């Protein structure tokens, strides 16, 4: 990514503390326009807490978050108007149909020409035949496609995707990755992507951040980072981060 590339997300000194537990400990990073950044780490590393603070769902203990230069803490509605997300743990209301869900969320985001936008997304995500089906009866893969369609409703400048392909079959997962790459490559959006599938991360991400115990431990090109740290693959590096994070910190003995 060029140093002159505009930043859609800037996170500085982000910290979240629950009593004696430090969930996120001084995290700083940026996502540029047209860039897909992987946020990686084992369960409990602080990834979802970080995403929830970016979305304004959780209040940071310290630090700043800016979306398109707008402070999320001070102007949450303005910052989040150009943000959207999809996550496997956040299904859409099951008693509403696919079209009803898209319409409700489209209204919340103030999407103009909403009916036309819904038609476009139903076509793009192969959901036309499910438009009147209630989301609660859809398969997990179909629900994921609806969630991704919802995430694209407002043509976000910042798109947060938490395990976006976890419930998809290989063909649908590949199609989703290609779609997200095209969307980011259009230059109007930056994407923060979490995944436990390291092959997917290598394919889709321009840059990755490895998080361990609430801190950013490593950062770099997912195709080069393993060899830079003496590992054969990104998966091997992920395992090392999960099991032996101190061995990866410069100047710290194993």
Image (cartoon, rainbow, N blue to C red):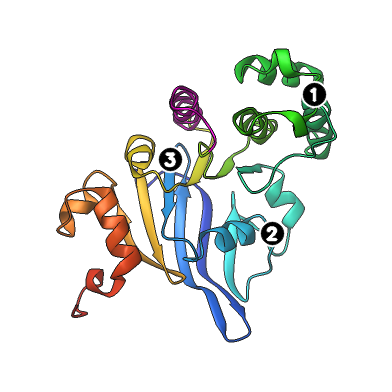
Q: Secondary structure at mark 3?
A: loop
Q: Secondary structure at mark 2?
A: loop
Residues shaded magenta: 167-185
Residue position marked by numbered label 3 in the rendering: 35
Q: Is 248 displayed left or right of 181 in the figure? A: left
Q: Is 99 displayed left or right of 176 in the figure? A: right
Q: Position of residue 26 (x, y in %)?
A: 48, 73
Residue position marked by numbered label 2 in the rendering: 56
Q: Nearer the viewer, mark 2 or mark 3?
A: 2
Q: Earlier in the sequence, mark 3 or mark 1?
A: 3
Q: Nearer the viewer, mark 1 or mark 2?
A: 1
Q: Which mark is residue 73?
A: none
Q: Nearer the viewer, mark 3 or mark 1?
A: 1
Cα distance between the residues tagged 2 and 3: 22 Å
Cα distance between the residues tagged 3 and 1: 30 Å
Q: Position of residue 221 (x, y in %)?
A: 28, 47
In the rendered image, the vertical position of residue 134 relative to residue 210, given as above or below: above
The structure residue drawn at horizontal position 51% and vertical position 28%, both measured from the top left corner, is 183
Q: Earlier in the sequence, mark 2 or mark 3?
A: 3
Q: Position of residue 198 (x, y in %)?
A: 34, 44
The structure residue drawn at horizontal position 69% and vertical position 30%, both measured from the top left corner, is 153
Q: Which image quarter: residue 109?
A: top right
Q: Which mark is residue 99?
A: 1
Q: Nearer the viewer, residue 93 or 140?
A: 140
């Amino acid at each position: 990514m060029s140093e002159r590339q505009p930043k859609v997300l800037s996170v500085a000194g982000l910290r979240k503390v629950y009593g004696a537990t430090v969930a996120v400990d001084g995290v700083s990073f940026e996502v540029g326009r047209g860039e897909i950044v992987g946020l990686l780490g084992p369960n409990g590393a602080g990834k979802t807490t970080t995403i929830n603070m970016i979305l304004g769902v959780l209040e940071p203990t310290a630090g700043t978050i800016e979306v398109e230069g707008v402070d999320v803490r001070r102007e949450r509605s303005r910052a989040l108007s150009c943000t959207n997300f999809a996550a496997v743990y956040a299904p859409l209301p099951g008693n509403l149909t696919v079209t009803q869900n898209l319409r409700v969320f489209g209204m919340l985001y103030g999407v103009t020409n909403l009916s036309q936008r819904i038609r476009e997304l139903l076509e793009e995500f192969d959901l036309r035949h499910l438009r009147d089906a209630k989301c609660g009866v859809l398969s997990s893969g179909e629900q994921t496609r609806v969630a991704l369609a919802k995430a694209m409703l407002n043509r976000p400048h910042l798109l947060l995707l938490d395990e976006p392909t976890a419930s998809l079959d290989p063909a649908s997962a590949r199609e989703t990755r290609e779609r997200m790459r095209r969307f980011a490559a259009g230059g109007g959006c930056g994407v923060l992507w979490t995944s436990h599938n390291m092959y997917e991360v290598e394919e889709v991400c321009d840059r990755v951040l490895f998080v361990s115990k609430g801190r950013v431990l490593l950062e770099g090109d997912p195709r080069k980072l393993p060899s830079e740290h003496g590992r054969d693959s990104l998966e091997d590096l992920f395992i090392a981060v999960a099991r032996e994070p101190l061995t990866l910190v410069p100047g710290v003995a194993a």
